[in-house]
């Protein structure tokens, strides 16, 4: 029972597309019309649900029995991982969905994300191989010339080749500008000799694809220092000759990391050019012809928003699977008697008050995060395909603000929430025979990947608050105020709308306090409080989205009545919104008080005090 995919249905996902979000505009875009309809998404999601249980989960079980290894200088993947990777790629559930080929049949972003919530829950170790191949192929598609596109994309989309983002070095993690990897011009235009070492490269090696295409950050010899001089290169494990044949490209794996989770996802240390025989194709401008300036970081950031959203989605997958497993266990576990009937029969623990509270805690957060996540994925579809420039701009603005929330809030909260799910098992939760201990180990990396959550919070407060002279974020907040103003008198959720109003007022106080610190030239207050600010921004926003869903659910409850088969679903939506607004959103008000008080003990404490 080490791995267990516990999603039983896709009802909430169907609600989001079919009832809540205005997804019909996406399904009516020329690219999708005639292929997909929002009414029919069950025909896609239900088979994926079965695939996850019958095919994807068994490979996750193999991951636990036979984690990735590094033996005799070569990596060994868990049994079945390669077959599963190729199957998903060949059947169209993977990288081919980023294709810009007019003839390609691709899924809307929002539907593709739902598929990967399910697959990611069934096998978290698999997801990085596909997502990183997506990201690498996306960059080649965006910045490569026709020769490079023809050389790489088809093989990356059919599962023959995989891809990576090759950034981190031992001396340069989040501060990418300090990388030391070098590139040297050759007699062949666009081809450079590559030399350097990288660490923590997810998917950096495997034993199941013919080639691995690294999107490699390096500095051309003679380019500017810092991020301004960084360039991006395609550096495959095996060099691709003009006739399509492959030859060694002097890329060597020196080891793999021994991680607390994602044990089937290989994280490699790599050396490039140890024998002076590594080559790469430059993507973008040659810094030696551009005043020493490269555009590697700008290119990477083009795909970063989507990569960050996908990281949050992976955290959601783990969170969902943890609570669905806990729900099933709590239904089966018989222990104790009800507080209101102490002499009665023993009952399933799901009937106990604290267990119900814990499960609703998870359900409310899960649905809040899903609401944020899929509203943002819908915006990706609008930004990409809508013919109206104003609609594209509005979608782009939402993506800018919501991305750090979806990535950081999800992965921060998932870590402790999965601990709560584990708690429902009692001592059994601590045992490896049950799934949640492994889910907890798997989920932790997501708060670190794609820019740590502190970096996400600094992006929110330092950049998104001031984007376009503050107008982008002001419109974001105004949309929440407008929602409140339109619905504040609703009798079913009058108390919850009062809390939303108080949270909006408190958020204004947070912004005013931070502006006062800035005026006082106290820049240290921003990193001191930025993570808390990101958390309450997400709680404010997610609370408004859950209330929006609850208004819909409340109407359905009255229409259907308690005897209808769907009554429990809508009753759950209403309960989740009430719980989140009454128990989570008040943190906005509490945090406003903390920030206005301005305690600086974390800054003032002498470093030597940590010795004791």
Image: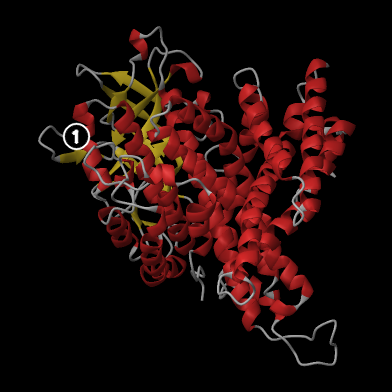
Q: Is residue 542 in sight in this rendering?
A: yes
Most foreground residue, 448 or 302: 302
**Image side of residue 482 versus residue 439, left or right:** right
Q: Position of residue 243 (x, y in %)?
A: 10, 35
Give the crowd class for mark 1: few <14, some 14-19, many >=20 residues within 10 Å: few
Task: Tell me the quarter of the picture where residue 98 sits.
Answer: top left
**Image side of residue 419 versus residue 274, left or right:** right
Relative to 290, does residue 382 appear above or below in the rendering? below
> Does dot 1 land on a helix, a strand or a loop?
helix
Residue ID at (65%, 35%) = 479
Residue ID at (72%, 33%) = 530
Circle 1 residue? 150
Q: Position of residue 115 (x, y in %)?
A: 42, 56
Task: Tell me the quarter of the picture where residue 503 sits.
Answer: top right
Q: Residue furthest front?
A: 559
- Image quarter in which the C terminus is found: top right
Residue ID at (48%, 16%) = 228
Q: Position of residue 593 (x, y in %)?
A: 87, 37
Task: Tell me the quarter of the picture where residue 55 sits.
Answer: bottom left
Q: Is residue 167 in sight in this rendering?
A: no
């Amino acid at each position: 029972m080490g791995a267990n995919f516990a999603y039983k249905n896709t009802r909430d996902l169907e609600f989001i597309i079919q009832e809540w979000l205005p997804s019909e505009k996406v399904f009516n875009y020329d690219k999708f019309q005639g292929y997909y309809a929002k009414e029919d998404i069950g025909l896609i999601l239900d088979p994926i649900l079965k695939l996850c249980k019958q095919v994807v989960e068994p490979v996750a079980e193999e991951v636990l029995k036979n984690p990735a290894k590094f033996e005799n200088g070569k990596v060994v993947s868990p049994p079945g991982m390669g077959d599963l990777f190729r199957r998903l790629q060949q059947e169209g559930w993977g990288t081919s969905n980023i294709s810009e080929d007019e003839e390609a049949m691709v899924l809307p972003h929002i539907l593709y994300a739902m598929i990967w919530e399910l697959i990611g829950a069934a096998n978290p170790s698999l997801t990085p191989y596909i997502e990183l191949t997506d990201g690498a192929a996306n960059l080649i598609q965006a910045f490569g010339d026709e020769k490079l596109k023809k050389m790489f994309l088809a093989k990356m989309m059919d599962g023959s080749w995989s891809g990576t983002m090759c950034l981190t070095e031992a001396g340069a993690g989040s501060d990418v500008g300090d990388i030391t990897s070098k590139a040297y011009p050759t007699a062949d235009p666009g081809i450079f000799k590559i030399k350097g070492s990288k660490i923590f490269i997810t998917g950096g090696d495997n034993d199941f694809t013919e080639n691995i295409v690294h999107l490699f950050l390096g500095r051309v010899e003679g380019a500017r220092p810092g991020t301004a001089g960084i360039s991006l290169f395609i550096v495959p494990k095996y060099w691709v000759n003009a006739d399509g044949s492959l030859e060694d490209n002097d890329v060597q794996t020196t080891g793999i990391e021994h991680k607390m989770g994602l044990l089937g996802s290989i994280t490699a240390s790599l050396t490039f050019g140890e024998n002076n025989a590594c080559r790469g194709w430059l993507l973008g401008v040659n810094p030696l012809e551009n005043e020493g300036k490269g555009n590697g970081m700008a290119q990477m950031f083009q795909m970063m928003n989507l990569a960050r959203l996908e990281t949050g989605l992976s955290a959601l997958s783990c969170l969902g699977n943890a609570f669905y497993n806990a729900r099933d266990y709590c239904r089966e576990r018989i222990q104790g008697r009800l507080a209101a009937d102490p002499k009665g029969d023993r009952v399933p623990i799901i009937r106990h008050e604290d267990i119900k509270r814990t499960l609703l805690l998870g359900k409310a957060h899960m649905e809040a995060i899903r609401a944020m996540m899929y509203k943002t994925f819908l915006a990706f579809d609008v930004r990409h395909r809508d013919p109206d420039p104003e609609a594209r701009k509005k979608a782009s603005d939402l993506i800018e603000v919501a991305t750090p929330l979806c990535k950081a809030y999800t992965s921060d909260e998932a870590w402790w929430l999965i601990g709560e799910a584990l708690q429902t098992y009692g001592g059994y939760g601590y045992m490896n025979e049950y799934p949640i201990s492994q889910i907890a180990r798997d989920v932790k990396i997501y708060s670190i990947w794609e820019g740590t959550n502190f970096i996400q919070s600094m992006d929110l407060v330092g950049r998104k608050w001031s984007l376009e002279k503050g107008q982008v974020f002001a419109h974001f907040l105004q949309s929440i105020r407008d929602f409140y103003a339109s619905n504040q008198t609703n009798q079913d959720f009058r108390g919850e709308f009062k809390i939303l109003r108080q949270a909006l007022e408190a958020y204004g106080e947070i912004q005013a306090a931070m502006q006062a610190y800035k005026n006082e030239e106290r820049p240290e207050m921003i990193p001191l409080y930025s993570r808390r600010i990101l958390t309450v921004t997400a709680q404010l926003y997610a609370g408004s989205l859950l209330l929006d869903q609850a208004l819909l659910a409340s109407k359905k409850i009255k229409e259907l009545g308690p005897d209808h088969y769907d009554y429990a679903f809508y009753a759950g939506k209403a309960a989740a919104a009430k719980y989140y607004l009454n128990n989570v959103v008040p943190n906005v008000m509490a945090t406003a008080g903390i920030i206005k008080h301005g305690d600086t003990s974390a800054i003032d404490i002498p470093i030597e005090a940590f010795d004791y």
